[in-house]
Image (spheres, rainbow, N blue to C red):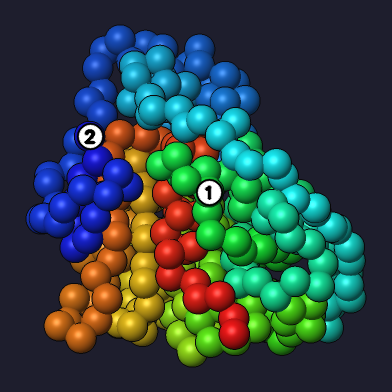
């Protein structure tokens, strides 16, 4: 069951207070199985496995949660889409990242290069690249989805290589500057994301954190944000013990802590989703509580419910996240 907080759940139902989280209970049966399931957990977790190991979680927890049903979520029908539009890939040298980066642009059905369209930027997770920023979908397939039986409003989607530095600036590698100073201008020259409220951002795991961070830093540029299982740590010490490369320093963590700076999203539509067996769930809860709820602001759409930091949850949350962004992106004039 999805939990509600300050907005609608993923299925679009009402607004209410956040229920107490359901947590998995450690049992003797589980503990006895930990040693046997470690390898299976890493294989099942995919890109999330890197973060599980770095966070020092017990071996096999992901696999055991899946055995016990904690990771079970309804599987979306990713075959329900219109004829897929064109998809183009390329590279450019990023001065901000000091390296060549790859990107892919997916166009919606009936559209192609040269068309003026709203733009969604999809940020990849830890260990990923522009080739696997989405879970089970290509960029062109994502914008061809039908949600609730209806096609998404036309919009393009771009993915790009952001490295492994959690989408925040590091010495010699600034993926945020790459996004705002290089990728977005390139896309706008192609007619994508031009005009007021023309750009949305989404991401999974590390990419979910990066999407929130980009929306907080550039509220005048980003019209809406959707984060799936964002990798939000609650302290610099926690982040450093889990992944020493996530932030260059404690000062950098403070500057890029999306919980502390959530007030910057007062006028930005936000959707965030997390499973309550996700190791980042406490950080996502803190972020949800910090989201502004002033009368002049825009209520956030927060979905908490059964799920883990694994592909089934990511995949299930992509259609409602894309539909959320589509609702808030105005077609450029």
With respect to residue 208, does 85 lie above or below?
Answer: above
Can the viewer see residue 193? yes
With respect to residue 4, does 199 lie above or below?
Answer: below
Q: Position of residue 16 (x, y in %)?
A: 11, 55
Q: How many marks?
A: 2
Q: Quadrant of the C terminus?
A: bottom right
Q: Position of residue 142 (x, y in %)?
A: 62, 48
The label shown at residue 1 is 2
Q: Nearer the viewer, residue 166 or 122?
A: 122
Identified at 34% across, 19% down, the residue is 69
- Categorize mark 1 by other alpha carbons within 10 Å: few (<14), some (14-19), many (20+): some
Q: Position of residue 248 (x, y in %)?
A: 59, 75
Q: Position of residue 318 (x, y in %)?
A: 50, 46
Q: Quadrant of the N terminus?
A: top left
Q: Earlier in the sequence, mark 1 or mark 2?
A: 2
Query: Which residue bears the numbered disc 1?
Result: 151
Image-based side of 318 in relation to 29, left or right: right
The image quarter in which residue 288 lies: bottom left
Between the residue at mark 1 and the residue at mark 2, the CA separation in whole angstroms equals: 26 Å
Q: Are marks 1 and 2 in contact (CB under 8 Å)?
A: no
């Amino acid at each position: 069951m999805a939990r509600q907080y300050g907005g609608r759940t993923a299925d679009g139902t009402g607004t209410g207070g956040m229920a107490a989280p359901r947590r998995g209970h450690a049992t003797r049966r589980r503990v006895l199985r930990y040693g046997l399931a470690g390898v299976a957990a890493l294989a099942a977790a995919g890109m999330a496995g890197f973060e599980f190991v770095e966070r020092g979680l017990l071996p096999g927890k992901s696999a055991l949660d899946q055995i016990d049903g904690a990771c079970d979520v309804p599987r979306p029908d990713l075959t329900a889409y219109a004829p897929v539009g064109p998809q183009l890939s390329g590279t450019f040298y990023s001065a901000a990242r000091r390296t060549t980066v790859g990107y892919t642009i997916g166009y919606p059905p009936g559209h192609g290069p040269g068309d003026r369209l709203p733009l969604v930027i999809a940020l990849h997770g830890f260990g990923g690249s522009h080739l696997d920023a989405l879970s089970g979908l290509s960029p062109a397939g994502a914008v061809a989805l039908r949600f609730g039986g209806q096609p998404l409003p036309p919009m393009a989607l771009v993915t790009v290589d952001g490295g492994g530095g959690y989408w925040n600036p590091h010495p010699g590698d600034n993926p945020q500057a790459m996004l705002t100073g290089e990728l977005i201008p390139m896309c706008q020259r192609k007619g994508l994301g031009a005009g007021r409220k023309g750009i949305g951002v989404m991401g999974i795991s590390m990419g979910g954190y990066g999407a929130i961070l980009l929306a907080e830093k550039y509220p005048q540029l980003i019209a809406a944000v959707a984060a799936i299982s964002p990798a939000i740590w609650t302290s610099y010490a926690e982040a450093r013990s889990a992944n020493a490369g996530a932030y260059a320093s404690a000062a950098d963590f403070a500057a890029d802590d999306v919980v502390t700076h959530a007030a910057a999203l007062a006028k930005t539509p936000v959707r965030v989703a997390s499973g309550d067996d996700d190791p980042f769930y406490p950080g996502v809860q803190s972020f949800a509580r910090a989201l502004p709820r002033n009368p002049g602001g825009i209520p956030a759409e927060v979905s908490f419910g059964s799920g883990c930091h694994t592909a089934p949850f990511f995949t299930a949350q992509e259609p409602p996240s894309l539909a959320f962004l589509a609702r808030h992106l105005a077609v450029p004039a």
